[in-house]
Every structure is written in C-alpha cells, then in structure tokens.
Amino acid sequence: MSVRLVLFLVWIQVKGLEYVIIHQRWIFVCLFLLPLSVIFDVYYYLRAWIIFKMCSAPKQHDQRVGDIQRQVREWKKEGGKKHMCTGRPGWLTVSLRVGKYKKTNKNIMIHMMDILEVDTKRQVVRVEPLANMGQVTALLNSIGWTLPVVPELDDLTVGGLAMGTGIESSSHIFGLFQHICVAFELVLADGSLVRCTEKENSDLFYAVPWSCGTLGFLVAAEIRIIPARKWVKLRYEPVRGLDAICKKFAEESANKENQFVEGLQYSRDEAVIMTGIMTDHAETEKTNCIGYYYKPWFFRHVEGFLKQNRVAVEYIPLRHYYHRHTRSIFWELQDIIPFGNNPLFRYVFGWMVPPKISLLKLTQGETIRKLYEQHHVVQDMLVPMKHIKTSILRFHEDIHVYPLWLCPFMLPNQPGMVHPKGDEDELYVDIGAYGEPKVKHFEARSSTRQLENFVRDVHGFQMLYADVYMERQEFWEMFDGTLYHKLRKQLNCEDAFPEVYDKICKSARH
C-alpha cells in the first residue's frame, strides 16, 4: 500500500496536480473528497445532536441575533459605503454559481445552523437559516413529523430555500418551499429585528421568497409540519410517446390523492411516472430501502422498470424516499465517478458517497469551472403545466440533456416575485436538466438565453441558483418586481443590499 501511495504521489508530481484534478478527477474525489465529506457529516451530525439534547440552541439564538444586529449597526456607523451580504464563503453553498460580490461587499458573519423548537400543537418547526434538510428531516422523522415539502439534497439550507426557492414531489399539493413557511424573522438594514407573517408585516412576508438575501438577513423561519408515516408506497409506470407522457404526468399531478408525483424522462419519448402515498403498513416482499449505501442509484433503479417495460409497486422508508437522489446528486455523480454505480464500488466505498458539493466547488479550480460552464448544464425551469409538451421539445432541441427531472407544483395566486399570470392558482412543472448537452451547436450563453426567452414567453420562471444570462429588463419581465422594489425603498435596502439581479445574474456580476 505504501509503495502504491508513493508511486501515486510521484505520478502527480510528474503530471502536475491540475492535470490530475481535471483529467482524472475521480482519483482526487475518491482519495480525498469522499473521506473529507464523511468527516464533515460526522462533525455536523454530532454537533446537532449535542445541541438538541442540551437544548442550548434557543439560549444561544438571541445572542447570535444580537451579534448580527451589532455588525449591521457598525456598518451604519462606518458610513454604509459598501453593500452588505452574509459572510458565508461562496463555496459552501449548494449552488454551482460562483458569486464574486462577497469580495467587494461588507461580510456579516452569521453562524446560525440549529433547530430551535418543534411545536406539535401549532404544527410548526422553528429553525435557523443554515439548518439543512438532512438535519431537519432526521429530527422530525424521529419524532413522527415531517415537512410537507422536503427539497431533495441533504445540504440544502432553510435560508437558501426560503429566500431562494425549493420544490419536491409533494409540491403539486403544498406548493413551493416558500408556501409552507408561516413566519420569517429578519434583521433589517437599520439593525432592527422584524417578524413577518401573512397578517403581520405581510408585504415583507411575501417579498422575502426569491429575494436572495437582498431585503435583510434571515435569522429564523417557522415552517409547517405534518404527521409522518413509516413508508412511501411508490408506483412506477413506464410511459412511451411524448403525448402519452405529458397526458399521464398532467393527470397524475392533478390527482390530489397522490401525495407524491415525479417523472424521470430518459429520452424524448420514454419516461417513468412515479406516484406515491405515505403509509404505516408495507408488504414485506415489496419493501426496498433505497437509501442504503450499497443500493443502486435511484435513477438507474427507476430506469430498470423502463427497460423491462414493467409497472411495479415498492414500499420505501419515508426518509429514504425524501433523499432518494442524494447519493448520486440526481445523476451528476456519474460524470465525476463514472463507475460509481458499479456494485463493487457501492459496497466498498458507497458509504462515503456523495462528496460534498461545497468541497467539489472548493477544489474545482478555474479551469474546471470554465469547462463546466461551457460544457455542462444545471438548470431548473418552471413552466405552466399546459406548456409541458412544447417545453420538453424546447429542452430537447436546445440542449438535449437526459434524464430530465419532472416535478409538478401548485403556484398560488399570491403577492411577490413569482405568481401565475392570471388571477387563479395554477399547476406548473419544474423541468430540471443536469448534465452534458448532446447538441452539436451548444454554447452556454446563447443556448441558455434561448431557453430563458422561451420560459419568459410562456410566463414561466427560472430558478436563481443556476447561471442566469438575462439582461436586467428581461429579468424583470420574467419576475414581478412591484412589491420587491416597493419594500427595497421602504426599508432603505437600496444602499444596504445589492439588487437581486445584480447579485445572481451573470450579465451584472463583476
């Protein structure tokens, strides 16, 4: 083993570290990032467990809020010459976008990653902004509760989901993550602490989602919880032909008896539509604990039903279902570790998977970042369900990435940046494309702009975690800035925080 390690180090020295990271990235990921990811997970799990058992989070929370207020007031005393932003390093975020604004803005340090209270009488959980989905579901499921909407990846934070957005296969009933939030607590540009709900400071409550931290610093959120069940009874149905796929998916999405609806589309004319319900009882011979490290990646498991052209039913543990795409980061990990779904790799190294997205970002370097930007797509476009067929065809023609993730959601007619074009709630679908485009003419900027133009034309929306190429006027044609800009003026945010467009759009970033 020592000889092999020495030979490996000599090879790196000869080839150069950058060459290895770019051309043989799986070596670097397997030898370094996977073990580091395990250490990160163990540390944060033990930290969360100790703090919850000691009930120390609520006591420390007020001190942390006070520290943020102090930093904001110091910024004011210094003349408020720079915009403010959180001091959390950009590489720690799940978004693949590299924001450079942190280098020029005043960094406000926020260390708030705890669950503060579970109130089963009011059916809400109160959490700090850096608490993540893995942490929240682990606690809630252990005491018989769950969130109505649990966005997929473990490391997604409450703050990112509340001030950005989040979606899951239950969203056709409950809406986006913002729609299960019942209260936000923010430190504003003047250092004051404000709580907002549908009835209290309601304008601010509706303006917070999609604002990406440009109205204030989120310090706590109250989120609805519902009773959990042990299992999800999941039905897999292969469907062929684009018309049949769109028809079946729309019908299942409109059926409120389905607690979960999801589609994985493997080509233009091949998909598997999945529907599920929670239950406390399972047929033993049909149980499948898909979250175990040695199990096949979920999207490959689903593809098996398509290849066999077989309708099937399985019973999956609730938390395994919630995080079914986590181990393979949907299907992104196959591009990083091509043999990651091999049974031998899963049994020997699968317990360390996935590598932290934050560590992948931290170690990717400028060369890999540019390669990913030009030859890789990570986009979620939210379009009205009535336009699902033309949308899929547009994805097929402009980028040709498969599988596509299809996730329905109900968009309520509420104030804010994102709402239906008409006066009624409307069913939408999130079309997620993650991978290497197969079209010959793909060019990151022009191809993405074609998609953005199409989505604007059908009154859809682009998730803001991804690369956004719109010009300012185009951006505010897609999003309703009426309430947002009103609050920016009222709360003196224009001198305190960058506008959301300047914070996230490539055309505006310096």
Image: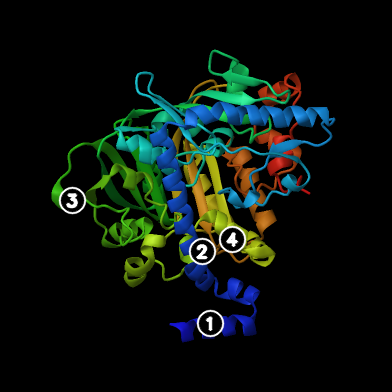
Residue 465 locus on image (x, y percent): 60, 45
- In whole angstroms, how far apart are the C-alphas of marks 2 and 3? 35 Å
Picture quadrant of residue 247: top left
Between residues 102 and 445, which one lies in front from this camera angle?
Answer: 102
Residue 366 locus on image (x, y percent): 69, 63
Q: Is residue 77 above or below residue 438?
A: above
- In whole angstroms, how far apart are the C-alphas of marks 1 and 4? 29 Å
Which residue is disc 4 drawn over? Answer: 376
At x 66%, y 57%, the residue is: 444
Which label number is shown at residue 286?
3
**Mark 4 residue crowding within 10 angstroms, few (<14) / some (14–19) / many (20+):** many
- In whole angstroms, how far apart are the C-alphas of marks 2 and 1? 16 Å
Residue type, numbered disc 2 = Leu
Which residue is disc 2 drawn over? Answer: 33
Q: Quadrant of the N terminus?
A: bottom left
Does residue 226 appear left or right of residue 63 in this picture?
A: left
Could you say whether the residue bearing mark 1 is in a helix, strand or loop?
A: helix
Does residue 124 appear left or right of residue 321 in this picture?
A: right
Which label number is shown at residue 8?
1
Q: Is residue 494 visible?
A: no
Could you say whether the residue bearing mark 2 is in a helix, strand or loop?
A: helix
